[in-house]
Image (cartoon, rainbow, N blue to C red):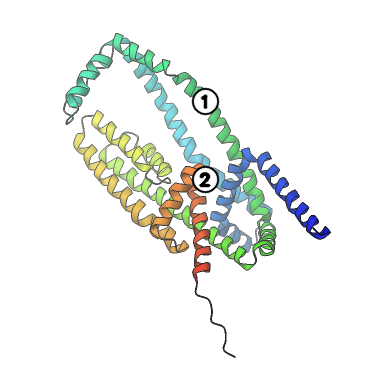
Amino acid sequence: MSRSSLQLFGRIALITVLVILAIWVLRRFLPALAWAAVLAIASWPARQWLIDKGVRRSIAAILLTVLVGALIVSPLLVLAVQMAREAGVIVQGFRDLKEIGLSTPDWVSQLPFVGSYLATWWTDNLSDPDAAKELLSRLESFGLIGWGRSFGRELVGRLIILVFTLLTLFFAYRDGPAIIDQIRTVADRLFGRSGEHLGKEAIVAVRATVNGLVLVGLAEGAVLALAYVMAGVSHPILFGFATGLLATVPFGAPVVYVVACLTLIAQSRVSAAVILFLFASAVVFLADHFVRPALIGASTRLPFLWILLGIFGGLETFGLIGLFLGPALMAAVMAIWREGSAPAKPHPVV
């Protein structure tokens, strides 16, 4: 083996080891870097608009970082405040359950198929104070206190990820053009012109996925919030916020509107619950099966099946960030497939 070959092999080995070590060192913060990249790609047109208006790069980066942080934190604060207000009602309900029990509502026995069984279980376990105390003690023995502590630690970890996401996002806004030029140069040296093409396909996929998931999810939350008001659901704005947040995940909105329907059933308003359930199911079905695929597919040229596979496969593999990484990977793979399957250009006849 020649000296140049040995040097090339050593250089490749050194680069590989350094990259692996860097990934290992940053493993805890990789989600923050990924979220910052997704947010920067999705909001880059706003950054470019500010720069075109003459705003300095640092000022534009600060403004956009604060705006994105407010858009993320504000709904969460609203939910936290509302949940804190309801916590007192829940605690008082547990006290009443231990002291006097909880009488069986009339609507329980009227439920089809399971009404009589559920009414009997309610009477045996919740109506009698002693039975209710025993049930609550069994629930506590399942580790609910430990679950609460682990939830607190998980919450602190998520807040740390959010802080580093916003910090990374600021530098992405400020130094984005230089970073893009460096990435383009490296991609050209490693992959040729196809590397830049794949990068553009991935960026378009991320931006389209953000529009398809976030914007459609917020629209679902607004429409269903109005439906909650008309159905007479308690705290309809809170349910609307929760629907908008969970609707960014495909099929996440049903978790919220099913709970809203159950609250109506608990108030003996079965007809309103059924109408709300049918209307909300129709809205979510149209959004998840027609509106979202149309928005994402129109920009990425991905078939409907690959959009769904990218979204759900990314969600299962990478977590929530996979909602955006999955379609980006599918778009890059489809670009490679189209480039490889394109018919070869005929050689000119001499």
- Residue ranking furthest to the top: 130
- How packed mark 2 is, by other alpha carbons closer than 10 Å (few <14, some 14-19, many 20 or more), is some
Report whether 147 appears left or right of 104. Answer: right
Q: Nearer the viewer, residue 47 or 305?
A: 305
Residue 107: x and y in percent read 19, 27
Q: Nearer the viewer, residue 264 or 326?
A: 326
The residue most toward the right is 3
Residue 136 vs 278, above or below: the answer is above
Residue 325 % position (x, y): 52, 51
Q: Position of residue 232 (x, y in %)?
A: 27, 37
| Residue identifier under label 2 | 321
Q: Which mark is residue 315?
A: none
| Mark 1 closeness class: few <14, some 14–19, many ≥20 residues within 10 Å | few
Give residue 54's quadrant in the image: bottom right
Q: Which residue is mark 1?
A: 150
Taking the spot 49% from the left edge, 51% from the top edge, the residue there is: 326
Residue drawn where x is 54% and y is 82% of the image:
346
- The foreground one among 11 and 45 is 11
Could you say whether the residue bearing mark 1 is in a helix, strand or loop? Answer: helix
Q: Is residue 214 visible?
A: no
- Quadrant of the image for the N terminus? bottom right
